[in-house]
Amino acid sequence: MHELSLSESITELVVECARREGVERVSKVVIALGEAAAVDAESLRFCFPITAADTIAAGAELVIDRIALKASCEACHAEYAPPTLIAPCPVCGSHARKIIEGREMRVVSFSGCG
């Protein structure tokens, strides 16, 4: 389960940034998670309280904002939202495409009191 190590990394990053900013307690963490990021959101929700325990982020709410897939066709340059990673371009039918959104995972923000 790589979600546990991802959750540890999220917790470490948030705690480090919060301490640098003088935040004494983190109450909410917001992450952006692409639909094709190969991360199970529910597993991440399960792991976060475990990795945040005994830190200034203990009890913090984890908010996961999902990012839809977005692709650019390399043949006709159309941008589209493919329903799957292997869907062809709806304009020209080409499978030559570049995924431009939907694979990322990033910490967007955190809030707390200080």
Image: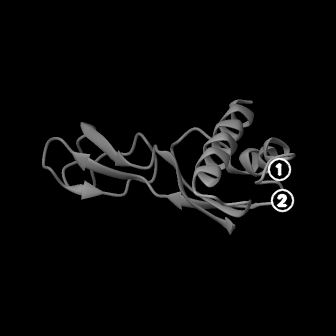
Q: Give the class, few, some or many, for how many residues have Cα within 10 Å of label 1's Cα (few <14, many ≥20).
A: some
Instruction: Please identify the residue farthest to the bottom as the structure is shown.
Output: 113
Q: Position of residue 8 (x, y in %)?
A: 71, 37
**Model colouring:** one colour
**Which residue has dot 2 on it?**
59
Residue 20 or residue 54, whichever sits in front: 20
Whether residue 112 sits left or right of residue 79 in the image: it is: right
Residue 105 or residue 97, whichever sits in front: 105
Q: In this view, does 61 lie above or below 4?
A: below
Is label 1 in a helix, a strand or a loop? helix
Res 38 → quadrant:
top right
Residue 107 or residue 90, whichever sits in front: 107
Question: Where is the N terminus found, in terms of image quarters?
Answer: top right
Res 65 → quadrant:
bottom right
User: Disc 2 residue type?
Assistant: Gly
Res 6 → quadrant:
top right
**Which residue has dot 1 on it?**
49
First in sequence: mark 1 vs mark 2: 1
Q: Give yes or no for contact between labels 1 and 2 (Cβ–Cβ under 8 Å).
A: yes
User: Disc 1 residue type?
Assistant: Pro
Q: How far apart are the alpha carbons under marks 1 and 2? A: 7 Å
Image point 17% across, 41% down: which residue? 74
Whether residue 109 sits left or right of residue 44 in the image: it is: left
Q: Position of residue 47 (x, y in %)?
A: 79, 43
Image point 24% across, 49% down: which residue? 72
Q: Position of residue 96 (x, y in %)?
A: 24, 36
